[in-house]
């Protein structure tokens, strides 16, 4: 199997990828759901970091520091940094932000590598729904130094319209913020894995296709 196929099986085995009927925060009723809260063990977070590292390596994303937005991004940045070193011999920094600026001790907004001018930073997140998280962290990073955001890596691109738009949050991130978003897999990859029997649930393919027909993002110019 490819690492993408392995990742989809990993999502299913961890209980992160579920099929059924789910009302999303957006109000849409979706035939599948991704719950990153199902990651619970050291083995799972180690494996997850390896998939992030594989995506960064495959896409040859220039990176000196991995940044994980608090709170969900913190273990992702740590595990991906370890995996890049163990799997590819690439030793990178890691960094994450605090929700509130610390006014005692070493102080500051960031833990780990402090941002510096010209530094190539890759943001790691679990999913991107509205792009709000990116909009919140960019001012923090750019306010600290003139860093270069070379990409953002997420687990799954749902490939569906953001609210009030014909484009997805992934497309909007590049068009509005200039940040290219890379996903380990897309919902199209998941449908293909269902078709090929990589994971169980082939009966859910028609409802996923109907959902994407209704909410799928417009591609191209």
Image (cartoon, rainbow, N blue to C red):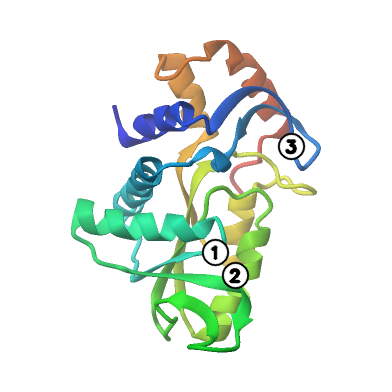
Place of residue 119 in the rendered image (x, y in percent of width and height, measured from the top left)? 39, 78
State yes or no: discs 3 and 1 in contact (Cβ < 8 Å). Answer: no
Asked if residue 100 is positioned above or below residue 9 in the image, the reply reads below
Residue 137 shows which numbered tag? 2
Task: Write down the residue under mark 3.
Answer: 24
- Please rate how many residues cluster around mark 2, counting C-alpha atoms within 10 Å: few if below 14, some from 14 to 19, many from 20: some
Mark 3 residue element: loop
- Residue position for label 1: 69
Position of residue 171 relative to residue 1, above or below, is below
Q: How crowded is mark 3: few (under 14 residues within 10 Å), some or many (20 or more)?
A: few
Q: Which residue is drawn at 62% across and 32% down?
A: 33
Question: Are the residues at dot 1 and dot 2 in contact (C-beta closer than 8 Å)?
Answer: yes
Q: Residue 4 carries which label?
A: none
Q: Is 165 drawn above or below residue 193 in the view shown?
A: below
Quarter occupied by residue 84: bottom left
Mark sitting earlier along the chain (2/3): 3
**Could you tell me which residue is drawn at 53 percent across and 63 percent down?**
179
Residue shown at the point (72%, 45%) measured from the top left: 166
């Amino acid at each position: 199997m490819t690492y993408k196929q392995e990742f989809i099986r990993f999502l299913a085995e961890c209980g992160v990828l579920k099929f059924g009927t789910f009302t999303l925060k957006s109000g849409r009723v979706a035939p599948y759901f991704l719950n990153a809260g199902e990651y619970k063990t050291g083995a799972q977070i180690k494996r997850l970091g390896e998939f992030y590292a594989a995506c960064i390596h495959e896409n040859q994303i220039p990176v000196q520091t991995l940044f994980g937005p608090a709170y969900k991004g913190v273990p992702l940045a740590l595990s991906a940094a370890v995996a890049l070193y163990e799997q590819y011999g690439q030793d990178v920094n890691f960094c994450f932000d605090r929700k509130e600026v610390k006014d005692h001790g070493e102080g500051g907004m960031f833990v780990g590598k402090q941002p510096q001018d010209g530094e190539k930073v890759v943001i790691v997140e679990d999913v991107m729904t509205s792009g709000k998280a990116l909009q919140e962290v960019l001012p923090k990073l750019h306010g600290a130094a003139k860093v270069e955001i070379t990409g953002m890596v997420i687990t799954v691109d749902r490939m569906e319209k953001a609210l009030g738009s014909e484009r997805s949050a992934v497309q909007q991130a590049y068009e509005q913020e200039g940040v290219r978003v890379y996903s380990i897999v897309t919902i199209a990859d998941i449908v293909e894995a269902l078709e090929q029997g990589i994971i169980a649930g082939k009966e859910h393919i028609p409802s996923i296709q109907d959902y994407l027909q209704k909410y799928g993002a417009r591609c191209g110019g």
